[in-house]
Amino acid sequence: MEKNYKIDVVEDVAGITVVKGFRAGAAACDIRNKNDFDRLDTAVIVSDNLATAAGVFTTNDVKAAPVLTDIANLDRTTKVRAIVANSGNANACTGDRGMEDARRTCEFLAEKLGVEAKQVLVCSTGRIGEFMPMDKLFKGIEGALGSLSDSAESASAAARAIMTSDTRPKTVQVDVEFNGKKIRLAGMAKGAGMIEPNMATMLAFIVCDAVISQSLLKECLKFAANKSFNRITVDGDMSTNDTVLCMCNGSSKVEILESDADSIMAFRKGLLEVSKALARKIVGDGEKITKVVEVHVCGAKTEGQAEKICRSIGNSLLVKSSWFGEDPNWGRITDSAGYARTGIKLEKIDLDYDGIPVLKAGQPVAENKPLWKKAVSKKTFTINLNLNLGQAEETILASDLTEGYVNFNKGE
């Protein structure tokens, strides 16, 4: 289908308040119980009017209480007014008390805003298996509401408040023009470890000023997440709390209609660009990483085959360790591609690092070895694996595995 839109991506904006009709606030309430009242740990995002909402959540069988609460709320309503998120405590594996605490959190903010509890979504990230200090969280919500505004400062504070092991906030703005109309999307995210979605410890909140139905928004968000957040890996671990939420408040008056293919294409592309930008920032801030590697598999029989091989390579501890050591160990790459057990044939494989041939029809291009080393010594590089079996392709973003990651995660 012909492209009838223009996309403008603005990196590292203050945050979600660049979209009209959304306000943000943040506060510090020592949810980590470390007597640290300087570190922001509670964020609130509020739409000035009811906003169409949809979410994509972890596929982990063990889902945290906030995830289950949001799934239930979005089943009960198509419109929401607010999101409350905290860092420092995941409220995961906390049983009936955790569910009650998540419900009470929604009720508390709903009462403050004068809305129904089902119109509030809740997200938590941090330590698993500890009960939420509710008195502190309630004070944090009150503090965040006290700072609520559409200012850049408030948006930036909210983006920082959801950080755990992140070293920096992650925000982006995307403007979309189509058929003489304009819409704006913005997003903020956190994530650095436990990153291997099918939806990592990652949270992402996206807002937009378009008018759209929940069913269409859900479809577009699922597509965007699948091609972005579900195409990254840092350590191969899927979290209990992974959540992507999108709110569209209609402040632009621009409608995205199921009967209008141009509007759907433009909105979907804008949503995808926001998601991809946030996903890249998550991998780039992976815990103690030194390399970001794009793994591209093409010439596959199906996209499923290509994706499975991408993940097998990107999650191989031997491959990731060689990336850290700047060792162009192509044998580990072909080995991990093979143990994905999808029916590849070595004699057909072409492999390159940043366009530098490594294998041709399964045979090493040994004279290029010094160039392989140079390629994998860079902070970012691309591995291209052509199976020469078909036309399908897939890509994931992955990171190396470092001594620093092990030391950082050997205890809490």
Image (cartoon, rainbow, N blue to C red):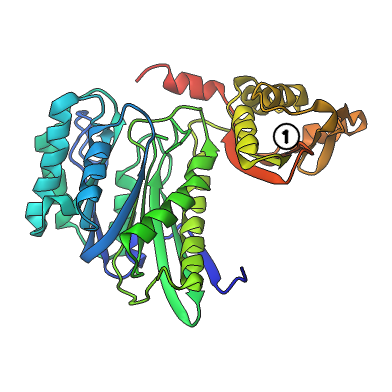
Q: Position of residue 277 (x, y in %)?
A: 51, 52
Depth order, front residue of 257/98: 257
Q: Position of residue 339 (x, y in %)?
A: 66, 21
Q: Secondary structure at mark 1?
A: helix
Q: Quadrant of residue 208?
A: bottom left
Q: Residue at x 20, y 39 (%)?
A: 37
Q: Position of residue 311 (x, y in %)?
A: 59, 32
| Residue lying farthest to the bottom in this orientation | 180
| Residue lying farthest to the front in this orientation | 259
> What is the quadrant of the C terminus in the image?
top left
In screen coordinates, is 90 left or right of 286? left
Vertical placement of residue 306 versus 48, above or below: above
Vertical placement of residue 183 versus 202, above or below: below
Residue type at numbered disc 1: Val
In screen coordinates, is 226 left or right of 148? right
Vertical placement of residue 74 versus 342, above or below: below
In screen coordinates, is 100 left or right of 6? left
Asked whether the viewer can see residue 123, the reply is yes
> What is the quadrant of the N terminus in the image?
bottom right
Asked whether the viewer can see residue 15, the reply is no
Q: Quadrant of residue 96?
A: top left
In screen coordinates, is 260 left or right of 62? right
Residue marked by disc 1: 376
